Image (spheres, grey):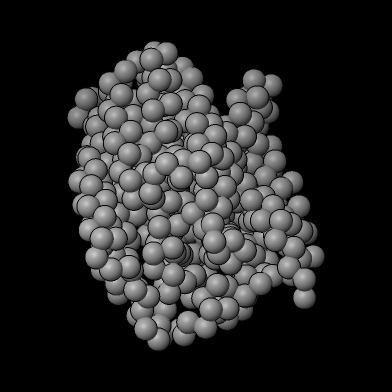
């Protein structure tokens, strides 16, 4: 068996591109779906939330079985779910069909990460955080492509169904590529760490701390991005362009992860990112007109490194947590976002109802509520920086005995 590391990495990036296209296109057509199917914001929140709780469902189950069935079979399942979810979305006719199709795509997205995160760390064991950033740059990259497609297709009057159908092209390509390639075993299996040792490592207090922090970093990044068209539609006529700009900054930032990580340790980078994210959300909730684009740049710089650096930090400092550790982190983040979407959908409708139908400030109020989360994270990551410095001075991090 010959492992083509470069080809596997490129195919992984393409599969993540499909995941991110689903986010970008859905964010761009969300208001259209609401109008066409007569859905209120609570219903739209429930639909988008299914993608976020379908993801953790798949990523956690995938993390448990990936060492057993292998990464290749898991990615073949992801291909089937993506294909099914896209087709179901195209032919959706209302709330429940959108609910089921979005859930199916969420399961596909989670299955991709369940296989590809441990695949990347297995392919690049000496450069995990950098390569996870390079892999995850295709998440904002796909959102940029997806949101631009929405703008172009809307300009030419093409339907949202055609916009969704564009995801079939990269889906078919990544499905074909993975079917032809050989895969390595996961890093945990190749290093001889037992299954019991892996689960024991999950009880490490540092892992539990990072697991909880993942709730906040994911909500800060993904809720704001997924609902940007709804939250800022009364602030600017180009809300979807804000998403494009924000994710464009993330794409460029992750591409330059290697030099950035030479300047800052992962924990310091997380602290800096949280400060910028908090500032970005504050400005998004207060500025109007073209000034909002400045806020989007700052916000994009803030959330840029959140997801891959959280995963890289855990897998580097707690390697015995293996694939299940990576996937529990991803599952925690998406599950938190799913609950937050439902809560904020209802909160948005309540604000509008209290204002007797006036929704001119509802988006800003939702953003101001969300601002609390990165502010709490600033305190948490300050503690992490202090802890890691004191630990480095005393004793190196020990892996869990097996």
In this rendering, would 198 be left or right of 382? right
How far from the left and from the top, in percent, is residue 252?
54, 34
The C terminus, quarter of image = bottom left
Quadrant housing residue 73: bottom right
The residue drawn where x is 58% and y is 67% is 122
Determine whether 26 is above or below 248 in the image.
Answer: below
x then y, percent, for residue 148: 61, 29
Q: Is residue 319 left or right of residue 209?
A: right
| Rendering quarter of residue 375 | top left
| Tally of numbered tags | 0
Instruction: Please indicate, yes or no, whether residue 6 appears anywhere in the rendered image.
Output: yes
Q: Quadrant of residue 9?
A: bottom right
Coordinates of residue 253 in the picture (x, y in percent): 50, 36
Image quadrant containing the N terminus:
bottom right
Q: Locate residue 387 relative to residue 313 in the image: left or right.
A: left
Residue drawn at the location 47% of the way across and 30% of the way down: 246
For the point 34% across and 73% down, which residue is it? 398
Closer to us: 121 or 79: 121
Q: Residue 296 location, x and y as percent?
A: 41, 26
**Can residue 221 be seen from the camera position used here?**
no
């Amino acid at each position: 068996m010959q492992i083509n590391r470069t080809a596997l990495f490129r195919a992984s990036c393409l599969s993540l591109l499909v995941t991110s296209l689903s986010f970008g296109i859905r964010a761009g057509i969300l208001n259209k779906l609401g109008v066409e199917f007569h859905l209120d914001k609570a219903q739209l929140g429930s639909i988008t939330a299914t993608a976020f709780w379908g993801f953790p469902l798949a990523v956690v189950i995938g993390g448990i079985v990936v060492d057993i069935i292998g990464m290749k079979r898991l990615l073949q399942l992801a291909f089937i779910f993506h294909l099914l979810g896209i087709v179901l979305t195209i032919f959706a006719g209302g709330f429940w069909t959108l609910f089921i199709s979005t859930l199916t795509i969420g399961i596909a997205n989670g299955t991709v990460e369940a296989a590809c995160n441990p695949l990347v760390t297995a392919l690049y064991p000496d450069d995990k955080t950098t390569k996870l950033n390079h892999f995850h740059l295709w998440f904002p990259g796909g959102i940029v492509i997806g949101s631009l497609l929405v703008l172009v297709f809307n300009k030419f009057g093409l339907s949202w169904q055609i916009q969704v159908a564009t995801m079939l092209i990269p889906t078919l390509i990544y499905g074909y590529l993975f079917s032809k390639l050989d895969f390595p075993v996961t890093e945990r299996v190749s290093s001889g760490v037992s299954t019991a040792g892996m689960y024991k490592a999950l009880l490490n207090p540092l892992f539990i701390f990072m697991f909880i922090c993942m709730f906040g970093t994911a909500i800060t990044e993904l809720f704001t991005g997924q609902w940007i068209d709804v939250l800022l539609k009364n602030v600017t006529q180009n809300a979807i362009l804000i998403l494009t700009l924000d994710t464009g900054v993330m794409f460029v930032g992750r591409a330059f992860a290697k030099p950035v990580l030479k300047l800052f340790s992962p924990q310091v980078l997380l602290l800096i990112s949280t400060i910028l994210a908090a500032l970005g959300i504050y400005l998004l909730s207060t500025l109007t007109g073209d000034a909002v684009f400045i806020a989007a740049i700052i916000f994009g710089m803030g959330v840029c490194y959140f997801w891959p650096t959280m995963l890289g930090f855990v897998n580097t400092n707690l390697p015995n947590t293996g694939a299940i550790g990576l996937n529990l982190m991803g599952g925690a983040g998406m599950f938190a976002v799913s609950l937050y979407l439902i809560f904020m959908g209802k909160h948005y409708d309540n604000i509008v109802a209290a204002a007797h139908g006036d929704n001119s400030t509802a988006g800003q109020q939702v953003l101001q509520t969300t601002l609390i989360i990165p502010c709490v994270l600033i305190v948490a990551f300050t503690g992490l920086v202090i802890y890691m410095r004191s630990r480095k001075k005393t004793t190196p991090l020990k892996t869990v005995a097996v």
